[in-house]
Image (spheres, rainbow, N blue to C red):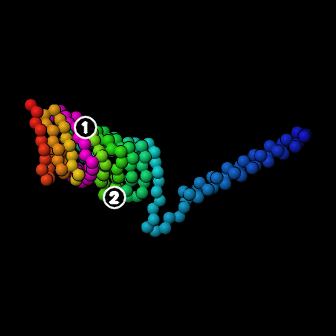
Amino acid sequence: MGPRFIKILVVAAVAVGLYFWASHLKRDLDLVNKPVSKGETMKWELGEVETTRLIGHDQWDIAAKNVVRDHPVDHLKDVSALISGPSGERTVRAPSGQYDSKKKELTLEDAKGYWKRPQYPLTYETPLAHWMQKGDHWDFPRGVTVSGDVYSLECESAEMIGQRNIRVKNGCLVWWSQ
């Protein structure tokens, strides 16, 4: 085996390597340019997504461990949010949820968190929370449990408009502690 033979082997190995690299690159680029028929959308899966949004007077710092983008609805896994504003600091945690970017609506399942306010901080839990950006409207159609220093309440269903107007539907149990 002479030096010329070794050079030919090296050149051949590099050429084969470049061929396979180029074919994989072409396959990957073809996926990006894949034609999508009218009415069909492509799904994208993203991991460890974090974003900050200013909504009204509040800053929302939102994170999700996994997001499947299926326009216009994003499917979220392991969601957490910190909402800071004039009414205090709120946290939200949920194992799953969806965000509809067209309607600007967020739905969370098995959500819980706290609301740190100047007076009467509280914690809450709900099997389903639905938030609509228009009017800063929260709906708890399957009930909500709220606990604080001064009171606790358990409702069959409720809604909160803005950050002050709370409406309870179908009755509520309330415990006051002084």
Task: Please identify, in this view, whether the residue under mark 2 or under mark 1 is nearer the observer.
Answer: 1
Is 119 above or below relative to 24? Answer: above
In the image shown, does 168 or 138 lie closer to the viewer?
A: 168
Outermost residue toward the left in this view: 178
95 over 42 or under it: above or below: above
- Seen at 21% across and 49% down, the residue is 143
Crowding near pointer 1: few (<14 within 10 Å), some, many (20+)?
some
Residue range corresponding to the magenta coloring = 115-140
Mark 1 secondary-structure assignment: strand
Q: Does 64 appear in magenta? A: no
Write down the residue under mark 1. 114
Where in the figure is residue 110, as x and y percent of width and height?
30, 46
Which residue is most to the top?
Answer: 178
Q: Give x and y (percent) for residue 85.
A: 24, 39
Is residue 98 toward the left or the right of residue 47 in the image?
A: left
The image shows residue 92 at horizontal and vertical percentages of: 29, 41
Q: Position of residue 77 (x, y in %)?
A: 39, 47
Marking on residue 102 = 2
Q: Residue at x 54, y 56 (%)?
A: 32
Q: Is residue 103 left or right of residue 163?
A: right
* Chief secondary structure of the magenta portion: strand
- Quarter of the picture containing the N terminus is top right
Q: Are marks 2 and 1 in contact (CB under 8 Å)?
A: no
State the residue in front, 32 or 57. 32
Q: Amino acid at mark 2?
A: Lys
> Real-space Cα distance between discs 2 and 1?
28 Å
Q: Is residue 151 left or right of residue 19?
A: left
The numbered mark, 2 or 1, whose residue comes first in the sequence reads: 2
The answer to whether 53 is drawn above or below residue 23 in the figure is above
Circle 1: residue type: Tyr
Q: Quadrant of residue 84?
A: top left
**Residue at 47 percent of width and 53 percent of height:** 44
